[in-house]
Amino acid sequence: MAHTLKAKKRDLLKKKVAQLRSEGEIPAVIYGPEVKENVIITVSEIEFTKIYEQAGTNTVVDLTVEGEKEPRPVIIKATDVEPVKDNFVHADFYQFKVGVKIDVTININLVGVSNAIKNLSGILMQSLNSIDVKCFPRDMLSSMDVDIATLETFDDKIYVKDLELDTEKFEILNKLDEVIVSVSAPRVEEKIEVEEKPAEEGGEGAEGEEGVEGEEGKEGEGKPAEGGEKPAEGGDKK
């Protein structure tokens, strides 16, 4: 279902961007293969925010520009957001060529409960967060759900080929054997046993040497010093 949005052409010389935003309008631009020259416009911030919250990107918007008879089929290609107030300050609209397929990125949302995670304490491993497809603009999807209930063991995997996509509408550009999500076994911390090692021989020898040195010291104490013998001789001469 296409959403509708009204826009006004903007004269860069008449109103500054700050003034437009203060009046509840945000500047925007229209471009694409069907546009010879970029069209500078403004749209209501309130209306644009409503549509973006409902549709996001990859959704067709019938954009009616003031002064034009027919609405322009566009998609919201990009947005700029003010980081502090978290409101939109600019938008890019891509006007596609009707009847021609375009490349689209579809985000993957994981849903459901996996037995390998719930009962086996496995770890979820998501390899792909999105897939690329080619389709007509009015068949586009912003995201799709993937049920992980089929992941019952650590050997189970969900591949791109397992996605429930209508192949008549969507041409998948990813490799079909690419893994989207799997469950790995929980990590087990290895316990390292520290064995008590016997004292090294060198250590024992050192202790023995200390004992020998002590004994030598004691023997030394029992022997008279050579320097002490001479004075005794001198005393006898007197």
Image (cartoon, helix red, strand yellow):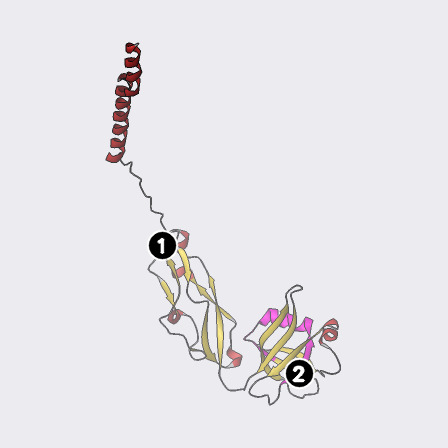
Nearest-to-viewer mark from 2 and 1: 2
Residue 185: numbered disc: 1
Does residue 156 appear to the left or right of 78 in the view shown? left
Magenta stretch holds residue 57? yes
Residue 200 in sight from this viewpoint: no
Front residue of 95/213: it is 213
Residue 102 in sight from this viewpoint: yes
- The part of the image, by quadrant, that contains residue 207 is top left
Q: At 58% across and 75% down in the image, what residue appears?
A: 78
Sequence-wise, the earlier of marks 2 and 1 is 2
Residue at the outermost front position: 238
Does residue 10 appear to the left or right of 108 in the view shown? right
Tag 1: amino acid: Ala
Q: Is residue 206 above or below residue 130?
A: above
Q: Is residue 41 above or below residue 128?
A: below
Q: At 60% across and 73% down in the image, what residue appears?
A: 79
Residue at the outermost bottom position: 36
Q: Callout 1: helix, strand or loop?
A: loop
Question: Where, quadrant-wise, is the C terminus in this rendering?
Answer: top left
Residue 15: numbered disc: none
Q: CA distance from mark 2 to mark 1?
A: 54 Å
Point out residue 87 in the picture as x, y percentages from the top left corner.
Answer: 66, 67
Q: Callout 2: helix, strand or loop?
A: strand
Q: At 25% across and 25% down in the image, what residue appears?
A: 212
State the residue position of label 2: 40
Q: At 62% across and 82% down in the image, what residue appears?
A: 30
Q: Which portion, as a residue range, is magenta?
A: 38-61
